[in-house]
Image (spheres, grey):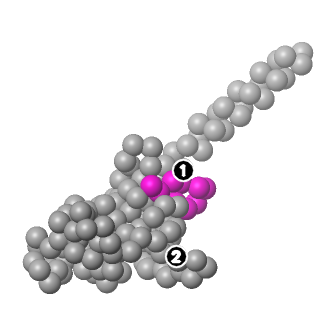
Amino acid sequence: MIARFVLGCLTALTAFMVTMTPAAAADSIAGRWITEDRDAVVEIKQCGNVTCGTIARFLITPPDGADQRDIYNPETRLRTRRLLGLPILTNFREEEDLWRGQIYDPNTGRTYRSVIRRKSATTIEVRGCIGPFCQAQTWRRAR
């Protein structure tokens, strides 16, 4: 009798977990997003067991043209990398309703702690933090 009860509880729990999985997947931040300054499109996707994002397209051509290099990078050997395709979101891991990782700003060559939170189907909030100070931007889904 107790074994049947435990088996019933486990079956109900399994069914509950299976029905909850699609809801979590629906909240993914994967896709193409237009930055708040409307100067680029960033493609966010799964990169192995973490989430990452790269500059997929320029909406405003950089000062040195579409072939702009990562000239502000503090590591001299990385200054020849092209900005187009450059990873700017790295090592993001999902934690309930947000993702934590690092964001690279190619305009300054600095990397910051970052948090991304899904606000709606068409917007995400991207925060970059140094110490206790954070700055947030709202990115909109690209069509």
- How crowded pointer 1 is (Cα within 10 Å; few <14, some 14-19, many 20+) is rated as few
Residue 40 lies in the magenta-colored region: no
Give the residue at x 14% y 84%: 63
Q: Quadrant of the C terminus?
A: bottom left
Quote the CA–CA distance across marks 1 and 2. Answer: 26 Å
Looking at the rendered structure, the kind of residue marked 1 is: Ala
The range drawn in magenta is 91-99
Give the residue at x 77% y 21%: 7
- Of marks 1 and 2, the one in the foreground: 2
Tell me, for residue 129, which label it has, or none. Answer: 2
Of marks 1 and 2, which one's residue comes earlier in the chain? 1
Q: Specify whether residue 104 is in view.
A: yes
Q: Residue 3 placed where, x, y %?
A: 84, 16
Give the residue at x 52% y 61%: 100
Q: Residue 38 placed where, x, y %?
A: 28, 81
Residue at mark 1: 24
Q: In the rendered view, tell whether residue 111 sits above or below residue 24.
A: below
- How crowded pointer 2 is (Cα within 10 Å; few <14, some 14-19, many 20+) is rated as some
Q: Residue 121 placed where, x, y %?
A: 43, 65
Q: Residue 8 placed where, x, y %?
A: 77, 25
Q: Is residue 3 left or right of residue 36?
A: right
Q: In the rendered view, tell whether residue 103 sits above or below residue 3.
A: below
Magenta stretch: helix, strand or loop mostly? strand
Report helix, strand or loop for mark 2.
Answer: strand
Looking at the rendered structure, the kind of residue marked 2 is: Cys
